[in-house]
Each structure stands twice: as C-alpha cells, then as structure tokens.
Image (tube, rainbow, N blue to C red):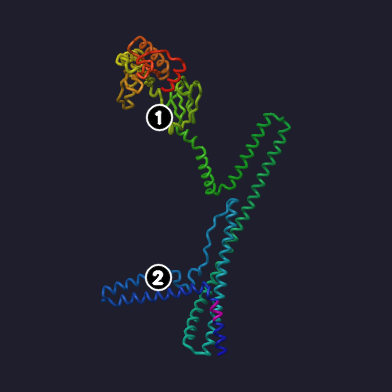
Amino acid sequence: MVEINILLEKINKIESTFKDNILLKRYSNYLSYSKISAELDQLKDSLKKKNNLAEELEYQLLNKIRVKENELELIAEYKGSPIGSLMNPPEIEKFENITNPFGIINALSNIKKIENNRQQFNTLKMQIETTFQALEEELTTYRELYALDSKSEYKEKITFLDKQKRDFDIVLDIVTTTQEVYGKKIEQVILEIKNQITQQIQKMFLIFGIIVFLFVISFLVKLTLKKYFSQTENYYMVNKIINFTLAFLVLMVLLFSYIDNVSYLVTILGFASAGIAIALKDWFMSLFGWMVIVTSGFIQVGDRIRVTKGNVETVGDVLDISLFKITIREDVTLVTYMQNRRAGRIFFIPNNYIFSELIANYSHSELKTVWDGIDITLTFDSNHKKAQKIIREILKHYSKGYSDITRKQLSKMRNKYQLRATGVEPRVFTFIEPHGVVISGWYLTNSFAALVLRSTISTEILEAFMKESDINIAYPTQQINLNRTSNPYGPAMNRKVVPEELEELTNKV
C-alpha cells in the first residue's frame, strides 16, 4: 500500500503539469475529431442500410449528419494531426530585393521576424519533447502501479497513454525532421538578405564618395574662379551656375543609381504629383479656364466685361488674356459711380473664375449695346400719362441709332443662338410705390459709353418736367399742420410759431 500511494502521488504530480499544456488540449481536439468522424461514418452507414425508414427518422438522421459535418468543419485542422496546425512551421514570406538604402531597414526587420519564427518552432519542439517524456514517465508509473494493483481502470489508462505516447512520438519525429529542413531554409534566406545588405552598403559608400568628389571639384573650381572674378554680380552668377550644375549632377547620380527600382520611383513621383496637384489646384484650373476661353470665344481682347466676386464688382475692358489671368482696365461706369467711387485701376482676374464666379460680357459676339434704365418718382397728383409720353419721346430720340444697330446685330446672332424677345424700341413702365408713382424708362445704349447717354437723358427729362405745371417730382419732404381744432387760439387760425414751439411740435410729430 505504501508503494501504491507513492506511485499515485507521483502520477498526480505528473498530471498536475498537464493542466496548462496546450499540446494535450490540442490532442483532446484530435481525439474529438476521430470520435466525431467515426460517429459520422456510422450515421451514414445507417442511412444507407435502412432504405425503408420513416420520413421522420430519415429527417432526424440527416440532421444529425449535418450537425456532425459542421462539428468536423470547426476542428478540421486536427484531421490527421494530433496537435493541429502547429506541426507546420510559420511560412517564410518572400522578401523583396534591396535596391535602395531604405530597403535595408525592411531587410533587418525581415531577418528579425524570420529569427522569431525559427525560435518559435524550436520552442514547440522542446514542448513536444517535454510532453513526450512526461507521458512516458506517467505510462511507466501506471505499469508499475498495475503490477501492484491489477485494476481495470489502470489497464485502460495504460492503453490510452500508450496510444498517446505513440502519437506524440510520431509528432516529435515529424517536427524534428521539419525543424532541420526549416532551419536550413531560414539560414539560406538570412544569408541572402545579409549579402544584399552588404552590397547595398558598399553601393552607398561608393555613391557617397562620388558626391564628395563632386563637392571637392566644385569647391576647387570656385576657388580658382575667385581669383579671376571679384565679389561682383559676375562672380555671383558664376557661383549660382556652379551650384546648379552640382545639384543637377548629384541628382543624376542618385537617379541612375536607384533607377532600377521603378516601383519605388513611381511611388515617389505619385505622391509628389498628388501634392503638387493639390497645392497648385488654382493654377491648373486657370490653365484649363484659359483653354476654355480661347476655344469657346466667350471672352476676347477688347470686350467689356463685368466681374463679381463676393461683394466686389468691377466693369472694365479686357487688355490681355494670358495662361493664368485676364487683365482688365476699369472704366468709369454706373458701377464705379454707385459702388466703387474709383476707376482706372488694372484688375487681374484668374481664369478659373469662369467656373466659379459671375462674369458678364457687355460686348459678346459683336453685340455692342446694352439696356439701361432710369427711374423717376412722381407725386400721386401728377399727370403720369403725360410724363410717360414725354419720357418715351426723349428715349426714342436719343436711342434711335442704338436701336437700329442692335436690330442688325440680333439678326446676325440668330444663326448662333435661339432668340425670342428681340424688341429694340424703348420701353416705359409705370408702377405704384409707397412714396409716389415710379416711371421706369429703358433704352439701348453703347456698352462702352452708357454713363454719358444716361446723364444726357436724365438732364433732358428733368428740363421737360420743369416746364410742366402738372408734373411734380417726388422727393422726401415733411409737412407740419398747425390748423388743429384743439388749438387754444380757435379753429383754423394761423399764427407764427416761435422756434421753441416749433421744436416742441417737431418732437411730438
């Protein structure tokens, strides 16, 4: 009994070491795979043999078969492998050839990764050896125990351990052979990487030597030329030429040294092109805008255009259309009179404005006239019909020539555009507004001299209205009525108002 207790205690110690053994846990999955596979074969045999099964029983068998197949799929890596996929060493990734100094960093990282994979596989082999020795020791102990106490459970355990030991013996043999082959392959890969690193370092030193040689030559050339040139602009230009030549030669040396790595060069150029495209987006859009302007003829040199950018407006004549901008000279127009109060400035309009901003052409396609309008407000008691007639006659008189010209120009434009409203006679409209009757007169005028004709017509209308007693121009006025029934001096009584009373009355109003 003492010997039996000693052996049982020894077995307990051995099995306590198996508690966290990942290999034995994987081996249990292997046994489960074998068990489920055997049960699946039995179910399939039952389904084949019993052809006259009831539909319900056949349905149950098919469900069981599907369940077992799903279970096998989950632990498929243990098919024929007691420890699953651990028997296969980590795959050695194919490394790229080192063609530039930056590749040395990746190469060193690959070497470290491969070494870690080899160390990991060596550790696995040591774990398998340790587990195999423990199983062998446990099997020997159970055999000694069975010799002292012939229990059936000890015999079953011996049978199980014997099979487990043989399985791990096979696994150890496979892993040992694999380790030798895997180790040699890793050594070969590491040796090839190190050789490429050595070659790249030698190439770097050679390129560095060439660059240093070029710098020394440029320094000696500068030193020699310094004796013949004083510190003037000539020496400065020569120095700039030497520096530019040196930079060009260094760049050529680097490019021709690493030009074989086309993918690396293309990547750099791709990033550089993307950065340049983002940084110079407006320039590229202006260049494209120039192509649109030139090919379409929307704007030509000599045209009068109006450009609106936010709250800023300007009207001027096109002086030049270059690759990136439109140059215009601001003229005295209604816009300068109403808003800018400045004229004669030179504006540079980026060509990309044609895609994002409002640009109006006052002289497109030989159409040199535009509609201009004058609004005059009359009092409600004025003879607005007479005023309307006077304005129409004045507009006809001063815009007749421009109306005839516009009629001919619109006839020519019908070949290019679909024109509907082509009336060219002056138009007069009458509107009722809160402060009077507004008469709006519209007429055609020269695009380049609209302000001059506007001034002339305004003067003529004013003089014509001054001659008529029943036409009064409305303007902001105030009227104080002192004839009030509550006046202490009596109704409808007029009297002089002293300044103090006027101020008081004004405040009340």
Amino acid type at circle 2 is Glu
Q: Nearer the viewer, residue 185 or 296?
A: 296
Q: Nearer the viewer, residue 231 or 130?
A: 130
Mark 2 element type:
helix
Amino acid type at circle 1 is Ser
Q: Nearer the viewer, residue 403 or 438?
A: 438
* Numbered circle sitting on residue 118: none
Closer to the observer: label 1 or label 2? 2
Q: Mark 1 vs mark 2: which is more N-terminal? A: 2
Residue at the spot x=55%, y=87% of the render? 5
Quarter location, residue 487: top left
- Please state the extent of the stretch shown in magenta in the rendering: 12-16
Q: Position of residue 208 (x, y in %)?
A: 65, 47
Lateral position of residue 103 relative to residue 481, left or right: right
Quarter location, residue 444: top left
The residue carrying mark 2 is: 71
> What is the distance, in whole Å, between disc 1 and disc 2 at their CAs?
72 Å
Mark 1 element type:
helix
Q: Position of residue 132 (x, y in %)?
A: 54, 77
The residue carrying mark 1 is: 296
Q: Classify 10 Å Cα crowding around label 1: few (below 14), some (14-19), many (20 and above).
A: few
Most common secondary structure along the magenta stretch: helix
Q: Position of residue 73 (x, y in %)?
A: 41, 68
Q: Taking the image as drawn, is residue 15 in sight?
A: yes
Q: Position of residue 420 (x, y in %)?
A: 30, 25
